[in-house]
Amino acid sequence: MKRGYQNRIELLQGTLDLLILQTLQWGPRHGYGINQAIRAGSGEVLQVDTGSLYPALHRLERRKWIRSEWTVSENNQRVKTYQLTPAGKKQLLAERSNWERLTAAMSGILDPSEGA
Amino acid sequence: MKFRRMRRDEEIDAEIRHHLDEAIRDRIERGEAPDEARANALREFGNVGLVKEATREMWGWVWLEQLRQDLGFGLRMLRKNPGFAFVAILTLALGIGANTAILSVVNGLLLRPLPVEDPEQLLSPFWGSKKDAQVWGSFSYANYKDLREQNQSLAGLLAWRQVSAGISATGERHAETGRAERAYGELVSANYFDVLGVKPVLGRGFLPEEERTSNTHPVVVISESLWQERFQRKASVIGQTIYLNGSPFTVVGVAPTSFKGVAFAFRQAFWAPLMMSPKLSFGGDWNTNRTWNLFHLIGRRKPGVTMTQAEADLNLVAGSLAQQHPSTNAGTKVQVVPQPESNFSRFSKVLRLSSLMALSVSLLVLLVACANVANLLLARATTRTKEIGIRLALGAGRGRIVRQLLTESMLLALIGGVLGCLFAYWGAMAVQASFPPLPYPIDLDFSPDAYVLKWMIVTAMLTSIVFGLIPALAASRPDLVAIIKGDAAGQTRSRHRWNLRGSLVVAQMAISVIVLICAGLFLRSLNRAVHLDLGFSTENLMTMQLDPRLLDYDEAEVKRFFAEALRRIETLPGVRSASLAGSLPLGNHSDEQGPMTKEGEPDPLPNQGIQVASNFVAPKYFETLRTPLVLGRDFTERDTKDAPQVVIVNQEFARKFYGSAENALGKRIRLWSGQAALREIIGIAQDGLYWHLYEAPRPFLFLPEYQVYSSAMMLLVSVKPSGEMKAVAENVRQTIAQLDARMPVAGLMMAEANLSFAYWGARLAAGLSSTFGLLGLLLATTGLYSVMTYAVAQRTREIGIRLALGAQVRDVLRLIVTQGVRVTVLGLALGLLGAFALTRLLASLLLGIGATDPLTFIGVGSVLMSAALLACYLPARRATKVDPMIALRTE
């Protein structure tokens, strides 16, 4: 059963956090919404595994980078939406610059001619 | 807490439900049929339970909640299977109990530090010749004082000496009120209580001026029990007088009960400044002569100083002393050991080895117990496959299942541990009760303390992992499809499990063989010990302690008293002969004299000479102990200080130094120093055992009591076979009372009881190892039995088919028994090999037999084989009763 998860695209933990924070930059969203936004935003390439998404959301919430709110949807369902906190915005900036350095370094290694 | 947990769970449920609803709605909007949309959304989402679990775990504390759940569940499972729970817990309790009991004893004997401030800082220095690898000598006062004043590494260094004294209410001689009681105490340096950090409950310890001049400050600190006994705990005790050896001492303090002195196992009644040695122990030049090694030392390290640094520092001082006083100190060194290790000095190696042995054996038994419980769990895992399979299918992670199963194991181990503690307490008390009676105030405590409890809990925890992990891993990996189809255990899986259980039984058998062989070796060794020719006989021999100096007798008075007492006792009805000895052979006492030189030989370098084991004896000692003199004559009353100096040696001495007894007789030797008179060898005594049962023939000297003099002697009375022990004992008492009514007679006992200390080790080793051996055998056999029973149950169908096809009862028996025998033979072979490799470690603890004694190996092999055959035969016979029709119908 567990093997099923392993077949999907695995994201590095930090990467998923970055994606979630980035997605929430444009306003509050619920879990499914974040999932869809990442999928659509990546042109269907990235599929976030729910077994990673929800633990990540709760982990970020516990670290106070995002906060949640319960609302009632138009069809009278309780919906939990997440939004970025000021600390989360700072974290997003930090992770972005980390990511940029990482990708620069990676492409430097993978394609040396480009840097030269 | 509970409220919040409910809300969090509900929240996660709601959140995930919303996610699914959204996904389904999206799919329907994209044109999928509702049913299809729902199925696809669920498939895409994955395992709902697992996602919930993983999300919940982000909130910490979950493990605690899970532990509570697991514990509750575990308890319910145990309650549902009381039979299993009972057997498993009892098995573990026996294993853990055996282990904890041994540790309690080792703790009481070897590990427990003195009940003083920061005992781990304490060390015990020893003094001796540089040529010896490990020295265990004590220190002269003069050397002690220099070491104390010149060392840089110790915060304090104290000196002590064990003494006994007669305590009386008055100092009058020859009066009923002057009746003395023998009491034990310590002569100590003035800094004793300060270095140890022991605070008197009343009064004070000693002052520096009480350690300046010899014999000038008769003060004493008494024990709380003496305070209770003699002064009814009155505070007015401070300043009052008690008489020690007939001299007045002023009470200045009372030591707490929790502190019983620094001498191992002794409970002391008093402490006096070592400057009072002339009154209580040795006089003369005791405090200036650097060869009078009277004192043991205990030092307290300064913070940050290691044992090695302290030893180097003390040797720096010892080196400069050797230069200043070459005639006494040349060639000497100091060695330090942690304080608890000093208790047994030269015996500590043997004791440590025996302790290690006993701990390892009990650990092996615990392993056998673990294997048994692991086997039970494996068998049970088969019946629980369905439950576990369903939980896995419902989304429990494998880790979670393993954790659940391990929690159950831990629960078993903890309950077993608590029960084991009870067994351990009984075991430790039994060992304590086996401690031989000694004519001293011994206070040994083997009861489990906090340290032992900690060990027990750690052992139980580790145990639960040892026996729980394999079954848990095996159980959490079932074939889900097979289970859901209703086939409880596929054929291949059961084969795998049989292998696992089979190997556990092999391990059990092997370990039991090793433990049983240890037991066999120790039993045979004890048998040898009991029938050993000691070179003397304790038959109808009575012993008691006499010391006229407790009543302030001087040397001439002591000798007169002894001679007169012996003369009168010899004439008592029923007495065969009587004598005196400094100690009884094998009586846990050892004394060496030296340097010894032959006539004409130059004096050896200081501290380089030959030391010879010795005893002080009165005339008729050899007759009383029935040790034949092979040549020459016995001592007589005429061998006094003024007569020519004489000595009796044993055959080994004669052989080693003169080649033969004939050659040695009449030769002269010199003891102690170049000025001492030469002693003529007037007799050769048959060899015997002197210090312990395991010794090789040892040169030995007997010195005539009336010539060399010691006041603390053991009175030996050999009673005729026709004599009535009780009557003789009473007559001896009265005879001594007639000589001096105040004279304390202590430790009246039969010599056999006195010797029991020598046999204690051998008896204990045999008793413990055979208990463990039988326990191991019992556990291993039940293990084999349960595995065989299980195997028969599994093969019921196969056996049914065989029987239906015409197999004979004999064939079925052979089929099953062969399966068990294969396991047994493998275990037996491994065990014998292991024992062959391991038992040589025991060689130094065995007496008169080799560590690979073939009789023991064969004996143990056949015992185990027969037990195993029985364990296989019973299930096999049940297999032959299988009704083919029923067997075939069950599936």
Image: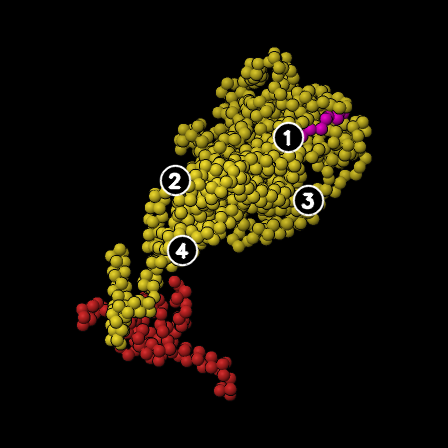
Residue B720 vs residue B191: left or right?
right
Residue A74 vs residue B729: left or right?
left
State yes or no: discs 3 and 1 in contact (Cβ < 8 Å). no
Tell me the number on the disc at residue B102.
Answer: none
Determine if marks 4 and 2 fall on one subunit. yes
Q: Which image quadrant for residue B588?
A: top right
Q: Which element type, helix, strand or loop, lies under badge 3?
A: loop
Tell which circle, 4 or 2, labels the residue nearer the N-terminal end: 2
Q: CA distance from mark 2 to mark 3?
A: 60 Å
Q: Amino acid at mark 1?
A: Arg
Determine if marks 3 and 1 fall on one subunit. yes
Q: Mark 1 sits on what residue? A: B528
The residue positioned farthest toward the top in the image shown = B573
State yes or no: discs 2 and 3 in contact (Cβ < 8 Å). no
- Colour assigned to chain B in the rendering is yellow
- Colour assigned to chain A in the rendering is red
**Mark in front: 4 vs 3:** 4
**Mark in front: 1 vs 2:** 2
Q: Mark 3 sits on what residue? A: B132
Q: Mark 4 sits on what residue? A: B482
User: Quick check: is B522 in the magenta stretch?
Assistant: no
